[in-house]
Amino acid sequence: MIRIEKSFEREIVVDLMDMAKNQVPIGFDTHSPHMHYRRMPYGKFGVRIKTPEPTDVVIRLDNVVIEHRRIDPGDHTISRTADGKSFVFAAPGTRITPAPAGESKVEEPTASPAAEPTPTPDFLAPLPLAPSHGLVIVSVRFVDVKPEYGPELPPDDFSHVCLQMNEHREHLRAMAANLRTVVASARIPDTGDFIVADGTKPATPLPRRTCCCAPDRE
């Protein structure tokens, strides 16, 4: 899970969800640039967000906004657009057929002037990014900033998390290409409770290594 540190020692937790298995997919993180890679099969996916405060959320897939909403404090998994369509990670070149629409209705012209289109907020505008496939960008900000002492402050700035989805083969290629910048796993603290195969306790704590290729191996 990716932790985003916000003001006044609060944090928001973000990650992807494989909706077919209802679990967070395995992957690895890199620095220079800071990116989160996830091994995701083609199909439905979601974004899991855990927040302590009301939060504005914008989700982009390949720089197209697929959902934006305000969520309450708690643990949420967002996997559908406002009109009920599932988030789908498809193979390159795959065309997703939209649901059949109802019969069109021709409206008679009226004398009333047409309503002006609502301007798009700045936070929903496309980001200056290169073309991509399977890149999910999650932007989050607290609706209100409430310090323990003092007046309520306006919403803070959006924080962005970049999550690159890759199917199995592409995930292995990405791992090989970014091996030098992979963020190492944190060492497990020495609590004295670790036992090796022969039943004895090791003299030093063992580092935890998570395999990004097989979910059942550590």
Image (cartoon, rainbow, N blue to C red):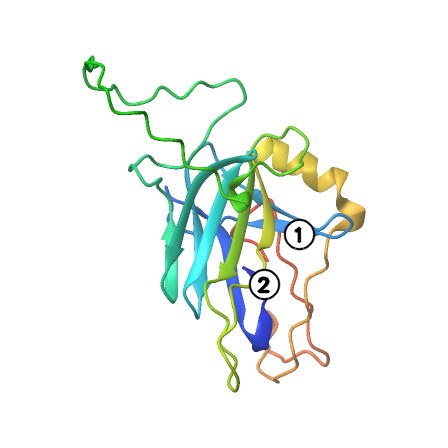
Tag in front: 1 or 2: 2
Which residue lies most toward the front here?
A: 111
Residue 125: quarter of image: top right
* Amino acid type shown at disc 1: Asp
Residue drawn where x is 56% and y is 63% of the image: 156
Q: Is residue 191 left or right of residue 69?
A: right
Q: In this view of the protein, which residue sits in the foreground, 184 or 144?
A: 144
- The residue beneath circle 2 is 4
Q: In this view of the protein, which residue sits in the foreground, 21 or 11?
A: 11
Q: Is residue 143 left or right of residue 28?
A: left
Residue drawn where x is 36% and y is 63% of the image: 72
Query: Does residue 24 appear in this view?
Result: no
Mark 1 Cα shell of 10 Å, populated few (<14), some (14-19), many (≥20): many
Query: Does residue 94 appear in this view?
Result: yes
- Does 70 sit above or below residue 8? above
* Amino acid type shown at disc 2: Ile
- Does 33 sit above or below residue 75? above
Residue 168: quarter of image: top right
Q: Position of residue 93 (x, y in %)?
A: 52, 17
Mark 1 vs mark 2, CA separation in Å: 14 Å
Q: Position of residue 61 (x, y in %)?
A: 51, 36
Q: Position of residue 97 (x, y in %)?
A: 36, 19
Q: Position of residue 98 (x, y in %)?
A: 33, 22
Which numbered marker is on residue 29?
Answer: 1
Q: In this view of the protein, which residue sits in the foreground, 50 or 9?
A: 9
Query: Disc 1 on helix, strand or loop?
Result: strand
Picture quarter with the C terminus: bottom right
Q: In this view of the protein, which residue sits in the foreground, 197 or 172?
A: 172
Query: Disc 2 on helix, strand or loop?
Result: strand
